[in-house]
Structures are given as structure tokens and as C-alpha cells.
Image (tube, rainbow, N blue to C red):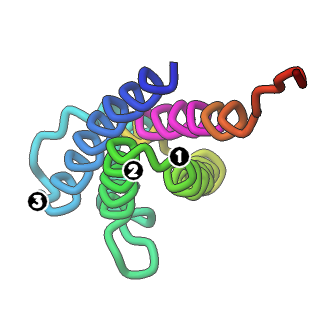
Amino acid sequence: MRTKAYRNIQLLSIVGILLASYLMYEYFAPLDHFSPCTINSYINCNASTKGELAKTLGIPTALYGLFGYASILLAAFKKWKRVIFGVATFGLLFCLRITVIELFIIHEICPVCVACQIIMLTIFGMSFHLMKFSSVKKITKPS
């Protein structure tokens, strides 16, 4: 069961890396290029890649995602459940911050960011499950 959870976390991390890579591409791409992420004025990636959310503490926000997903991927290969849980917890809070800013301040939604948030939430849930059930010890009857 745990091996399957680690495999699922690895797969989700790879998808997260691909999505974060796309956001990095959008960050460096010229402003007037075609973006499949732009659906309308409310649903687009502009706020996350060109606007207020493009950088966090002077670093491209997508780079945080790339680093986070790569860290989770490595930790899943090594079966470091505490590292996965720690990075996923930080990632979940980071994504929550982005979601709040998108919804209530900028009033734009980035579909790629939403996909990243769903992936991070799923990884967090799986890592929580790994942490919770790996600490349960088997009780044996005394002979």
C-alpha cells in the first residue's frame, strides 16, 4: 500500500513539474504571444506569470513550484515521508496564499495554478496518510 502511495506521489510530482515548467515558460515568454492558458479576462495565467503574482520575494513564483515538486519527487523516490509531508505542507500553504490573492484581490483565476493546487492538495493528503498510518505500531499479545 505504501509503495503505491509513493508511486502516485512520484507521478503527481512529475505532472506538477510539467505544469510549473509551463508557468516558467509563460513568465519568460513575450507579452503578445499566444497562450492556451488565456480563456478570457477572468480565467488566464497573466496575473501569475506577468502580473502581481509573477514574483515572490524577487524570485519567479513558478520556480518555487518547480523546486517544491522536484523535492517531493526526490523524497518519494527515497521514501522520505517526513520530507514529502513538510514540503507538501509548505506547498499547500503557498498555493492557498496564491488562491486567496487570485480570488479576492486580483479577481483572476489561473487554470494552471488551480491544477497545481489540486495536485499539491492531493500530495498533501497522501503524505498525511503516510505519516498517520506509518506511526501506528502493531500490537502483539504477550506469550
Query: Which residue does the numbered mark 2 point to in the structure image?
Result: 75
| Start-end of magenta stretch | 115-128
- Give the amino acid type for the residue marked by disc 3 in the picture: Pro
CA separation in Å, label 2 and label 1: 7 Å
Q: Position of residue 2 (x, y in %)?
A: 50, 26
- Among the two numbered marks 2 and 3 on one chain, the one whose residue lies closer to the N terminus: 3
Residue that sits furthest to the front in the current view: 143
Q: Position of residue 131 (x, y in %)?
A: 65, 40
Q: How many marks?
A: 3
Checking the image for residue 30, the label placed there is: 3
Q: Quadrant of residue 65?
A: bottom left
Q: Position of residue 117 (x, y in %)?
A: 50, 39
At label 1, counting other C-alpha atoms closer than 10 Å, the crowd grade (few under 14, some 14-19, many 20 or more) is some
Checking the image for residue 111, the label placed there is: none
At label 3, counting other C-alpha atoms closer than 10 Å, the crowd grade (few under 14, some 14-19, many 20 or more) is few
- Give the amino acid type for the residue marked by disc 1 in the picture: Lys
Residue at horizontal 12 percent and vertical 52 percent from the top:
32
Residue that sits furthest to the bottom in the current view: 58
Q: What is the secondary structure assignment of the residue under circle 3? A: loop
CA separation in Å, label 3 and label 1: 40 Å
Residue 47 drawn above or below residue 63: above
- Give the amino acid type for the residue marked by disc 2 in the picture: Ala
